[in-house]
Image (cartoon, rainbow, N blue to C red):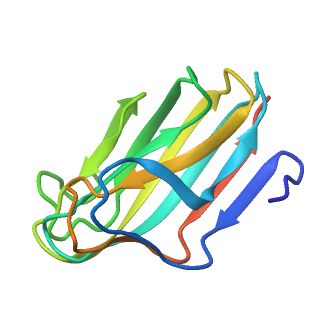
Amino acid sequence: MTVINGHINLVKASDQSKTNDNTLGDDDDLKFAVLNGETWLVEIVGFVNVASADPDFQFALNGPAATDIRFCLRICDVTGVVGNSPGDIKTAWEDELDINYTGATDDEFVARGVFTASADGTFALRWAQEKSEADATTVKRGSSLRAWRLG
């Protein structure tokens, strides 16, 4: 990863799938190092595939311990998503968000957030199945994370 003038651009080169796993964990590619006191604006564009209605998808934006992250989510393609409509915007404060599906689907989401790191460490997209299931949940190749250091 290279930081150029305070800007980071990361793109997943290959799909990453999880089965029988509902514990949030860092994405293999969409993460970067931060230093104590740095303030960052981040944008994640995620392409997700769920193989059936059961696994669903949960995610969180995660920074070093005690780092508060304010973010919002826009679900771009909500065909078959329970309790959402096109263009829904959700907000969270130090929380995970779940996307619940009625069946197998491909979906896109955009999450934007801002945070000031409380310690040196790693900022990452964390994700998992919402329900542990043998059917795969996949974050697809081409998903990306862009970040701008504000201070």
Q: Which residue: 31% across, 58% down? A: 21
Instruction: Say left or right for 63 vs 107.
Output: right
Q: Residue at x 70, y 35 (%)?
A: 121
Residue at figure coordinates x 85%, y 52% from the top left:
3
Q: Position of residue 140 (x, y in %)?
A: 46, 75
14 above or below 128? below
Residue 49: image quadrant is bottom left
Q: How many marks?
A: 0
**Nearest the eye: 12 or 24:** 24
At which x and y percent is residue 48? Answer: 37, 69
Q: Relative to residue 17, is residue 66 depicted above or below? A: above
Seen at 18% across and 56% down, the residue is: 100
User: Could you tell me which quadrant the N terminus lies in?
Assistant: bottom right
Percent position (x, y) of residue 122? 67, 40
The foreground one among 78 and 87 is 78
On the rendered image, what quadrant is the C terminus found in?
top right
Q: Is residue 65 left or right of residue 47?
A: right
The residue lying toward the viewer, choosing from 52 and 91, is 52
